Amino acid sequence: MEKVWLKNYQPGVPAVIDPDRYLSINEMFEEACQRFQNKGAFTNLKKVITYQELEQKTKTFAIYLQAVLKLKKGDRIALMMPNLLQYPIAMFGALRAGLVLVNVNPLYTARELELQLTDARCEAIVVLANFAHTLAIVLEKIKIKYVIVTEVGDMLSFPKSYIVNGIVKYIKKMVPKWSIENCEYFTQALKIGEKYEFKKPDVQGKDVAFLQYTGGTTDFSRGAMLTHRNIIANIEQAHAWIKPVIKIGEEIIITALPLYHIFSLMANSFTFMRIGALNVLVTDPREMRGFIKLLGQYKFTAITGVNTLFNALLNQAKFAKLDFSALRIALGGGMSVQHSVAEHWKKVTGVPLLEAYGLTETSPAVCINPFNLEDYNGSVGLPVSSTDISIRDQRGMELGFNTPGELCVSGPQVMKGYWQKPEETDGVLFQGWVKTGDIAAMDEQGFVRIVDRKKDMILVSGFNVYPNEVEDVIMMLDAVLEVAVIGVSHGGIETVKAYIVKRDPNLTVNTVLQHFHANLTGYKIPKEIEFRTELPKTSIGKILRRALREQNTEK
């Protein structure tokens, strides 16, 4: 498909980037720390660490991993914690030691954690004490040589650190009892590391930086091998995209999504570090009152999130009273941004909520909307610099404009493959392209619209029904707070079912059906409507259609 999208790039955005600008993430990190050394890098719980302090602490932690634990280049280390200052210290420290990062969702059950740590063959793990009880169960079944435990307030100054840790453990009772032999504490590891010298490893672009686990195109989790070059390429692509609208060294970005998720990891941590921004880490964005109070303390210039997060903020009366005068970038990803949410966001903040698209296998950014757009346009934007896309049918033939098919992506950000899964890799990668499993269409201007996940598509009497479209129609009703649409089977015949969370308790099935008949053709209208108080979600707030399908199967 001809690169028609290039003509709609925002002025100043190049057609190509240099994925070899930096030899490794470490080189980019060290340059940023030197350039912005006196500026704040990350802040959490009212504690700010500067780029200079971050460089020193990460080096100390890298030394501990090298000299004390004797971990060598290529060994895997897991991080299991929410957004705290310890996360970037541990992450960049491990990368500087030449290790491979394995991000772990701290809300995992023991079964899920065991599967991931076993598959990744982790040598070490850094875990928040709040989740150490889960790890303790797993350690009875698998062997991890080294466990490093941290507590919420560890990076705060004394006596605040002591007070915060005490409150979390004894008053809020957020730390279940656990027992792990021969573990080390994070603060102690940093002190021990000060006694040794740093030996800089030879890290190349081809070396794996992350095993980033994903459900991908099937329901089986697997580790996408993302190299240093993959990550650098995506940093440069994102940097080129935002460069026309940012001010170097002056940005303040709100990081509410967990850094262990690829979207937040790349868009917030890496890309904004590249430009010397202050990253405001939100440990628990679900606690809305505290989250909005935190937002009120900063003249933030950028915020990223998923649709459910933006929707939740907009449903808090105090959110509309915040100062949005400095805000220039509001970016949604991870799931579809709904028209109603985008329109409400623009009305409240005065800034358009723009959508981006990516996946773990592409490190993750593929498409982003230009930041000179005035309003949400229903698309996920244009392919970023140095990226090719192709819309293909089931035979692998390329389709024309405005014709839905599977989205395929090629570029320097495409992963090396799946860790220890050659068959899975061969099923997704072909001749430098990755098959995304998403159904998309491109218009004549190069804007891409994600129709839906291939596996979420519903086949009704031979017609394709895409849940995103039906959900968008339902969300047009002000009385609806959240919605999820799935396909259900009755005697081999598939029909549409909608799960709705009410905003207005007086909403009825008849009202919803009348709305459907006015806005959808017959075969797309749900045959079943179920009201719920909440919908199953991932740790980042993405609605889990798969969980709803499983619940239906169990009935």
Image (cartoon, rainbow, N blue to C red):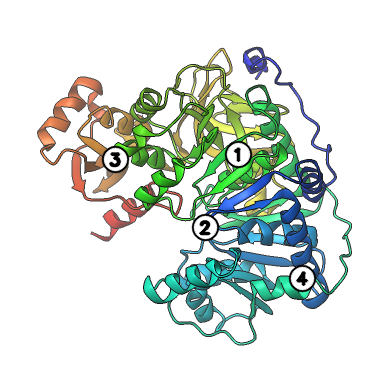
Secondary structure under the numbered disc 4 in the rendered image: helix
**Residue at image point 50% right, 30% down:** 355
Left or right side of 479 for 186: right
Using residue 184 as the reference point, say whether residue 503 is left or right of it.
Answer: left
10 Å neighbourhood of mark 2: few (<14), some, or many (≥20)? Answer: few
| Sequence-earlier tag: 4 or 2 | 4
Q: Earlier in the sequence, mark 1 or mark 2?
A: 2
Which tag, 1 or 4, sits closer to the chain's start? Answer: 4
Q: Are marks 4 and 2 in contact (CB under 8 Å)?
A: no
CA separation in Å, label 1 and label 4:
37 Å
Foreground label between 2 and 3: 3
Tag 3 residue? 483
Quarter that holds the N terminus: top right
Q: Is residue 308 above or below residue 191?
A: above
User: Residue 220 has which mark?
Assistant: 2
Q: Which residue is mark 4?
A: 65
Q: Nearer the viewer, mark 4 or mark 2?
A: 4
Amino acid marked by disc 2: Phe
Give me the C-alpha separation between circle 3 and circle 1: 28 Å
Q: Please, what is the three-letter code of the amino acid marked with disc 3?
A: Val
Q: Amino acid at mark 4?
A: Leu
Give the image location of residue 269, x and y in percent.
63, 46
Q: What kind of element bears circle 1? A: strand
Amino acid at the residue labelled 1: Lys
SS for dot 2: loop
Mark in front: 4 vs 3? 4
Question: Looking at the image, is mark 3 or mark 1 earlier in the sequence?
Answer: 1
State the mark number for residue 435: 1
